[in-house]
Amino acid sequence: MMRGTFLAERVDGIFRALSREHVTNRPEGFYKRMILNYVVTSYETVNHDQAGHINDLRSVIAKFMGRDEPNWQASSRLIDIARRTPGKRFMVDGGALYLKVFKRHGAS
């Protein structure tokens, strides 16, 4: 029972982390495109709170695919690599997920 609760809490946390200003994020649930704001800080470093949400998403996907959960540091490194080439799509976890980071203009 605790495992199910933990999984549900992770999914809820991911959903709550989604940007509320992007129409591609659906209020009723996940969709093929999900946007999180401020994955990279104004200092051009990885926002560790948002990296945690991405790692949780990867963990939930891994659970359903029967794979081991990814290491949190690996998710943070993926974001760090992606931030260096804004707009480039990176295949993650054998194509289970794609990651693309954009620099938000005018963000503080």
Image (cartoon, rainbow, N blue to C red):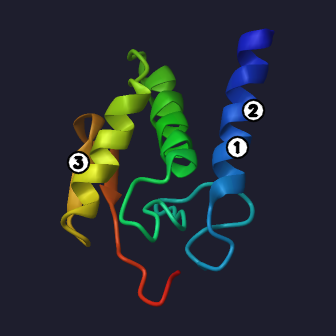
Label 1 Cα neighbours within 10 Å, binned few <14 / some 14-19 / many ≥20: some
Q: Which residue is drawn at 66% across and 67% down?
A: 26
Q: Determine whether label 2 and label 1 are within 8 Å by CB.
A: yes
Residue 19, placed above or below residue 77 = below
Q: How far apart are marks 1 and 3 (CA)?
A: 23 Å
Q: In this view, does 106 lie to the left or right of 90?
A: right
Q: Mark 3 points at which residue?
A: 91
The numbered dot on residue 9 is: 2
Q: Is mark 1 on a helix, strand or loop?
A: helix
Q: Is mark 2 on a helix, strand or loop?
A: helix
Q: Residue at x 32, y 32 (%)?
A: 74
Q: Where is residue 51 in the image (x, y as percent from the top left)?
A: 48, 45
Circle 1: residue type: Gly
The numbered dot on residue 30 is: none
Residue 73, placed above or below residue 77 = above
Q: Hey, which quadrant is residue 75 in on the image?
A: top left
Q: Name the residue under label 1.
A: 13
Circle 3: residue type: Met
Q: Residue at x 39, y 24 (%)?
A: 71
Q: Distance between the residues labelled 2 and 1?
A: 6 Å
